[in-house]
Image: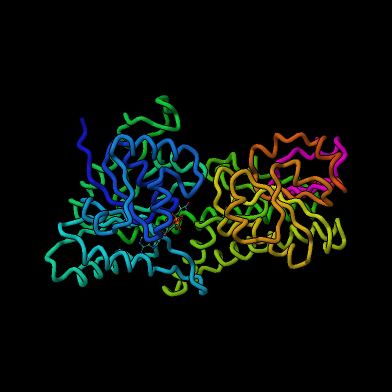
Amino acid sequence: MRAALEISVIGCGYVGLVTGACLAGIGHRVVCTDNDESKIATLQAGQLPIFEPHLDALVDRSRKAGRLRFTGDVADCINAGEAIFICVGTPPLETGEADLSAIDRVARTIATVAKAPKLVVEKSTVPVQTGQQLKQALAIYGRNSGVTFRVASNPEFLREGTAVGDFLHPDRIVVGVEEAAAERQLREIYRPVLEGGFECPVHAGKCPAGSPSQFLVTTINSAELIKHASNSFLAMKISYANLIADLCERLGANVDEVTRAVGLDPRIGPHFLRPGLGFGGFCLPKDIQAFIHLGEKAGVDFAMLKEAERINKQRVDAFLEKLRRALWVLKEKQIGVLGLAFKPDTDDIRFAPAIELIRRLLAERAQVCAYDPQAIEKTRAVFSEVRYAKDGYEVAEQADALLITTEWKEFRELDWRRIFKSMARPLVLDGRNLLDPARMKEIGFEYHSVGRPD
Ligand SMILES: NC(=O)c1ccc[n+]([C@@H]2O[C@H](COP(=O)([O-])OP(=O)(O)OC[C@H]3O[C@@H](n4cnc5c(N)ncnc54)[C@H](O)[C@@H]3O)[C@@H](O)[C@H]2O)c1
């Protein structure tokens, strides 16, 4: 029987909730807190403030087993754990630089309320050298208590939509440490993940045999840099695929055929080579900006990343241009938008291309009707003038154009013949290359996708 460790989690957003629920799910005792009281009230009432597959079952199971609780009392949370995972947001400032004020605030709070030594783990994505600042803040603000702190970086690589599986079956666990004791503590925390044997909510006891997770021990600076370097590389891959798609459109090739063949080269790999409306979400857009900013500050020319970001920002322009070419005038046209979340299987709309697209459509005074399986409530808070449909059929009714902006599986499975009959003009712009052009043409649609012959 493995020893359960006491763990505190600060920040109950996507990363904090998945971290807290998964660490409790593998046997530890976890207390989570957040400074958003309504979030804590929701969690204490047994509900989740976000949609993430398998998370509800995991939270429910761990709470019932007494291994997971939520508290609004930050001191209670901090003093419950021997290790504290900081999972607060690090959003971009106007300059693109990461806003580290939440990390700073949490550091000062930990330093002043902790009554015993703690391992303080940065899980939030932060620029290199944040760990050094964190260490300093803990030492200065905690100087009168006599309590000592160790600091470690443990960047999170989960993807929303598959976050629980990613946390429990990671390719790698990166820990940036300065002392052997911190490494030992983190190895102990992740032992069940590394050795298996926990009740996996994703695979119901039948986890596929894959390559074992790598436990990589680095310096704190390297661990922080690994996260930004990974996300910026992924962003560049997507932008590269989008450039290839532009070329395919102009010169008459099919981007699906090209990227499939390119991705079969093991030096390149097939993932993140999908062209479309570009990357969004709370990671890639802000992390590439923060990395560019960091490079500038360090005197390293990151023009390569700036290009990747510029190409990404152009995706919505290019998509709108296609719509204008087809519809001529957008004012008063009824536009159906299929998909609001930045990717399928999440309700997260932060930096979602669909949100930027709707903003522009409304600015041109188009009438927008939208549907998403999970993200309507969050979008309603942003756009009250949009009409929200109950499903993929209602959004298409009497529409002059239907835009596919998130690749939800259920959109592929819609009865497209029925949709064809219900639209005012059977025009579909597929921003995610979700549908088969030949089939759409056979039904009779005017169909445009990205980098594929119409
Ligand atoms: N979302 C992802 O897919 C993902 C993946 C890997 C890493 N990350 C990184 O993890 C971090 C968190 O991301 P997220 O998506 O969970 O963000 P989020 O905005 O969903 O959650 C952050 C939470 O922290 C809380 N918070 C802020 N200041 C606080 C304070 N002083 N005390 C207590 N709680 C506080 C907020 O109320 C919020 O609930 C970011 O640095 C992000 O870049 C995110």
Please tell me whether residue 377 is drawn above or below residue 62 in the rendered image. Answer: below
Residue depicted at x 36% and y 30%: 199
Q: In this view, does 114 lie to the left or right of 244?
A: left
State whether residue 289 is above or below residue 440.
Answer: below
Is 295 part of what is drawn in magenta?
no
Q: Which residue is drawn at 39% across and 40% down?
A: 59
Image x and y of residue 163, in percent: 46, 43
Q: Residue at x 30, y 59 (%)?
A: 220
In this picture, residue 274 sits left or right of residue 16: right
Q: Can you name the residue that lies furthest to the top here?
A: 206
The residue shown at (43%, 27%) is 204
Q: In which quarter of the image is ligand 1?
A: bottom left
Q: Can residue 182 be seen in this view?
A: yes
Q: Quadrant of residue 26?
A: top left
Viewport quadrant of the N terminus: top left
Please say which color scheme the image uses.
rainbow
Which is more toward the observer, 46 or 392? 46
Front residue of 152/47: it is: 47
Q: Quadrant of residue 165?
A: top left
Position above or below: 317 against 425: below
Q: Position of residue 169 (x, y in %)?
A: 40, 37
Q: Give the range drawn in magenta.
A: 427-449
Residue 239 seen: no
| Residue 431 is one of the magenta-drawn residues | yes
Query: Residue pushed farthest left?
Result: 146
- The image position of residue 265, as x and y in percent, is 57, 41
